[in-house]
Image (cartoon, rainbow, N blue to C red):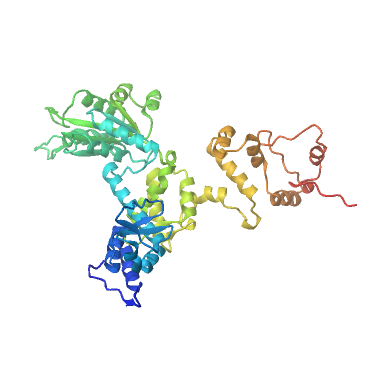
Amino acid sequence: MSERTIQPAQTGGRLAPDAFLREAVLVLRGEAAPREALERLLARACGLVAPAIHLADEPLALTATRALVPGGSDDLRVTAVGSVEMMSPAVSVVSLLGSLEPLLRDVERKVDVDCIVQALSAEQGDLLGASLVMRTLHERIVRAASKNFIVLIEGESGVGKELVARRVHAMSDRRGGPFVTLNCAAIVETLLEAELFGIEERTATGVRGRRGKFELADRGTLFLDEVSDLSPSAQAKLLRVIQDPTVERVGGHGSRRVDVRIVVATNRPLEALCRSGDFRWDLFYRLNAIEIAVPPLRARKDDVPFLADMMLRRCAGEQPYRLSVEAMEALVVYDWPGNVRELERVIERAVTLSASHVIRLDDLPGAVTGRYRDTFLPPDPGDETMRGWASRYARYVLSRTSGNKREACRVLDISYHTLCAYLAYKTPHARTNDAVLTGTAIPEEPDAVRPPVRRARDTYTNVTATLHPSLVHDGPPPKLKP
């Protein structure tokens, strides 16, 4: 915003608000401390002394010298130093500022999100998330980094095991040393020993010597990814160097002592591999000093909106993108078998293919939106009822609780009999059409999902059970003609 002095036009002793409006829009477009900039604008345009903008639910903190400026609203009020009579010329401008309150609040919310992202990025690296499982993970990383023991990181592919390893290194006393990585699954077994321990130079044969990963990571951290894919011979060599931190290059005769902290990661549980005979028990006991389990994305669904917003800001560049309500709900409902890596690819695809700055449900892949569409969107909007939607949602919650009806009742906050009624419900359109077109009776729901009916003194229920399917309905019995 320009620092020039604003001289608003005056007509009949009143301030013309057009100059203030133009400057206020420029302030809000800048999105840098908008409230403080608007307060400085008020001071210059209206002659107010130390004005302060207060949004709804914020205290006014009135004193003997600070009074409320007339012209505000319930959502935005302005205070300044001086008497109310001195502030009366600013009524029109303060009223105009009140109309900009929604935009001011949106700008401040965006600025707050940016500050949170920057703060979390500095504190957590790329391991962003505010859920309970993520807070527990960060506490464990801090404790593991304080010691010099071997760290075993377990988690599915795409959860960020290397990010955890880098965070352990960055928070340890070895952060000034190198961080060397090796993907054990990507190295041929015949070359693995040379990668780990290096090759001794042989002038006669023309072999050029080079250092291995252990030597490169001296006084630092060596990260071995996918350690579960090591062959039995490679496991024995790794066990030897863990027991005695000395390495001998391939083709060499002398050994070199190294000071390396080892961090390993696996996407398969090592204990189960030991039971099946695919991994050495003694190596497992050596590696399992400090275990860190990285949770999958489906175990922290609360972090999905935050991660999606952060990835949108990273991928969008100068063009601001946002997710529609339906698209965000579909991302939260999806189980994410590929975890954070899959979420990042989905956001990149949506940003590339979206026709506008709002990413809608159709911009997401069908595999991501399939469950959301089947559960929450009606197949035929003209035929949808509240009871039909509730039946689909109850079935969705039951699937999330692995078929545990008591747990589903707790999540939905309904009784057991109400849940059974929702599960047994079928749309009248589907019942009638299926019966008329096929000529077959509608199969009854199993006893586990059928709502209880009264057997004694309930002749209508017993009779309708034997009627033709086309006469069965959900409402009250039809009136008989006289």
- Of 101 and 404, which appears nearest the observer? 101
Residue furthest right in the image: 482
Q: Image height check: is 235 above or below 104? A: above
Point out residue 424 in the picture as x, y percentages from the top left corner: 67, 41
Point out residue 50 in the picture as x, y percentages from the top left corner: 27, 59
Q: Quadrant of residue 445?
A: top right
Point out residue 308 in the picture as x, y percentages from the top left corner: 39, 50
Q: Residue at x 23, y 30 (%)?
A: 146
Q: Is residue 391 left or right of residue 160?
A: right
Point out residue 298 in the picture as x, y percentages from the top left corner: 44, 40
Residue furthest bottom in the image: 11
Q: Is residue 462 left or right of residue 304?
A: right
Q: Is residue 340 left or right of residue 188?
A: right
Q: Image height check: is 184 above or below 75? A: above
Point out the image quarter for the N terminus.
Answer: bottom left
Q: Quadrant of residue 34?
A: bottom left
Q: Is residue 435 left or right of residue 100?
A: right
Residue 182: in sight, yes or no?
no
- Of 263 and 201, which appears nearest the observer? 263
Q: Residue at x 65, y 51 (%)?
A: 385
The number of callouts visible is 0
Residue furthest top in the image: 282
Residue 18: in sight, yes or no?
yes
Q: Quadrant of residue 233?
A: top left
